[in-house]
Image (spheres, helix red, strand yellow):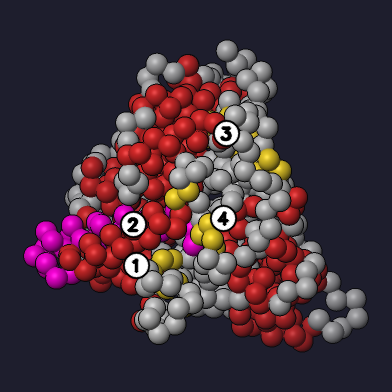
Amino acid sequence: MPPRRWSCDEAPGMVMGTQPPHCTSSRTQREQQAALAARPDALSPADRYQELFVAVQSGGVFDDSKTFVDCVPLSDPAAILEAYRQAHHRPNFDLTGFVHAHFRATRPPKSEYESVPGQPLCTHIDALWPVLTRHPSTHPANASILPLPRPYVVPGGRFGELYYWDSYFTMLGLAESGRTDLLADMVCNFAYLIDTYGHVPNGTRSYYLGRSQPPLFVLMLELAEQHGAAQAADHRSQLQQEYAWWMAGAHELSDANERPRAQASRRVVRLPGGALLNRYWDDRDTPREESWLEDVATARACQREPQEVYRNLRAAAESGWDFSSRWLSQIAAPAPAPEAPAQQPQRAASARSLTAICTTEILPVDLNAFLYKLETTLARLCQDAGDAAAASEYAAQAEARRQALLALCWDAGQGAFFDYDWRKGARRSCLTAASLTPLFVGLAEPDQAAAMAATVRARLLAPGGLATTECGSDQQWDRPNGWAPLQWMGIRGLQNYGHAELARDIAHRWLSTVAEVYQAEGKLVEKYALRELHADASHGGGGGEYPLQDGFGWTNGVTRALLAEHLDHAAHSACAHTAPD
């Protein structure tokens, strides 16, 4: 591991793992620190390499579309493109040979996640933080990786850069492991991204700049402040800037009295009656560069305009739920009767094809809950700073959002929150774990939380943990897969409203799932196939566009935090490569 490069505002002589000063460095200081990283390419790979990019991605030079966009050019990118233009028409031109002569593919070493036989789960997670830490000083020049001022923790596997919403759940574990130095580093990195780009990109690659991910910087600050690694008040300007980015375009939407139909601009939708809610979006309508071949195949498989398909695929990637029956226009499975056992997931036939994707037509309950949290936090910070006018405005926006969510997304008959289709003017029918996000941020009424708890127990609780959706499909954000961030938000949301028994039940089921796979395989993975019967064996999840990834940042973080709260759970005694108890 390269030596850690301390910044100018850190105390000399401080050692790794000790508590750092607050991240109070100015924007200028963060920019100066980031400038020490190698120079990135200002263009995304598709824009930079043009026809060479298309040839490589369509020609199957690499088995993963993400490999080429992460490659390191071995000389000036413009010179490589010119060399391709001069050579590719020649007889017997070897595209694969050309690419390997001009680029270095970056792949995680196979030994990166080897576990120590007999090592307990907690110890394994603590030992993984240095393995998953990257240093900006090692960034290669002219590649797609964006500069950052401080060291950072990556998810792992093919995800070797900083990701937005992943990082909050990773930071939960860093806090429990005593790594407040990395908590402060992560906060400074996200502040730098907002200062530089006006928002936090999906990930720190140039091809991710058109979109963000669920806006959780506000939660990162809350966590870091609890552990003495940052002060939220020091980052009020970044929170305001991020909020303005999510609300950009609102002023272009006319008053509801002028046009009774819903209107949309970028990530903002004005509904009849005047309420403003948000959707996921991407500023580009081309195939995702890291999944180019997959997106082109999806667009060719349907009769829709390709740009429309690409925009919706990109918007789903901004949600972090890429992909799920949640974002499809046709959901064949009806809601089950309350007495239907959770072990029998409803299967949506259309979930096998992304040609029906309609993400931009959906107002997601979780996104709007996160923005409610951002608005209420900004109201408090502005009040504390003596800006009563701004505080009043943010508080009013938060309350208006809350009332709109309760009116549009709450289904009293089913006892759950659902996403809202703003074009159809109707609630969606797909029950998902996102329904618990209003409890996580505290915007639900107590009776709604009680009903939600009953619905979760009847329809989303599997022997292995909290199910992602009620629909089984070949997409990774559907049943049978379970995901660490959804477990955490569900558990915390239920705890917030006094449903401690159900929260504890979910936590124990999840810890059992993670521990069983760790004992058998010596690793933590990105997602898990939740047991549908108690007698089933736990194993890693499947589905989606790429193989199951090891590592894994947010699984490590959530598991480490839950272990700290459940000291009586058998997962504490789980050791690598031992028979499950």
**Residue labelled with disc 3:** 338
| Residue at image point 54% right, 45% down | 432
Give the residue pinned by disc 4.
Answer: 428
Earlier-in-chain disc, 3 versus 4: 3
First reached walking from the N terminus: tag 2 or tag 1 = 1
Mark 2: secondary structure: helix
Give the distance between the C-alpha atoms of the residues marked 3 and 4, in whole angstroms: 18 Å
Residue of label 1: 242
User: Contact (CB < 8 A) between labels 1 and 4?
Assistant: no
**What's the distance in space between the residues labelled 2 and 1, CA to CA?**
19 Å
- Whether residue 227 appears in magenta in the rendering, the answer is no
Q: Can you give x and y, in whole percent of width and height, for residue 66 in the image?
A: 65, 61
Which residue extends farthest top? 581
Q: Is residue 100 left or right of residue 316?
A: right
Residue 220: x and y in percent read 33, 50
* The label number, if any, that marks residue 402 in the structure image: 2
Q: In the rendered view, would you say 320 is above or below 93?
A: above
